[in-house]
Amino acid sequence: MPDSTWSLHSQLTKDTIDIGDLPLCRVLVIKDANYPWLLLVPRREGAVEIIDLTEVEQAQLMTEVSRVARALKEVSRCDKLNIAALGNVVPQLHVHIIARRAGDAAWPRPVWGVMQPLPHDAEEVQTFISTLRRKIWLG
C-alpha cells in the first residue's frame, strides 16, 4: 500500500510529466526530447536508497523497472537502455530508465549535462505516453 504521506519531490514535479502509478512506483517522463527518458519513483515517504525499501518492495521495484524498461525498449527501438538510481541532485529515491541510441548527442557517455533539455512536441509526447501506458498496463 502506498504511503499516504508520500509526495513527489518538487524538482521531479517540475522536470517530469506524470504517466500514472504502478503498484509501487509513479511513472514519469523527463521533459527532455533529446532522449526517451522515464523515471520510476517508489511512493514511500523518506526512501532515499533502494535499501530503504523492504525486501518485498525491492523485488516489486525490480519487477516494475523490468516492465517499464521492456516497454520503453520496444517503443523506442533503442540500441541500449541505461538504468540507474543515482539521487545525487534529488535525494528522493528514483530510478532513471533512458533509451539510448548509438550516435545520440551523448553517446557513449552518460546523458547528464551534455545537452540542454529539448522541449517535447505536445502531440508526439502524448502519443509516446499513450503507447507506453498500454504497454505497461496503465490504460
Image (spheres, rainbow, N blue to C red):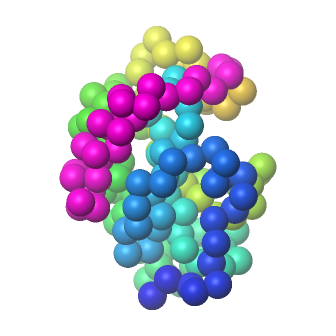
Q: Is residue 125 magenta?
A: yes
Label count reads 0
Q: Is residue 57 above or below residue 88?
A: below
Q: Is residue 106 magenta?
A: no
Query: Of 113 and 129, which appears nearest the observer?
Result: 129
Q: In percent of the image, x 22 and y 52: which residue is there? A: 134
For the C terminus, the quadrant is bottom left
Q: In percent of the image, x 30 and y 36: which residue is there? A: 127
Q: Which residues are magenta?
A: 114-139
Q: Position of residue 130 (x, y in %)?
A: 28, 45
Q: Is residue 71 visible?
A: no
Q: In percent of the image, x 54 and y 74: which residue is there? A: 43
For the N terminus, the quadrant is bottom left
Q: In percent of the image, x 39 and y 35: which residue is there? A: 125
Query: Of 12 and 78, which appears nearest the observer?
Result: 12
Q: Residue furthest right?
A: 89
Q: Residue furthest front?
A: 122
- From the viewer's perspective, is 138 left or right of 59? left
Query: Of 33 and 35, which appears nearest the observer?
Result: 33
Q: Position of residue 102 (x, y in %)?
A: 43, 16
Q: Position of residue 74 (x, y in %)?
A: 24, 37
Q: Is residue 92 above or below residue 90?
A: below
Q: Position of residue 11 (x, y in %)?
A: 72, 52
Q: Residue furthest top?
A: 103
Q: Is residue 26 visible?
A: yes
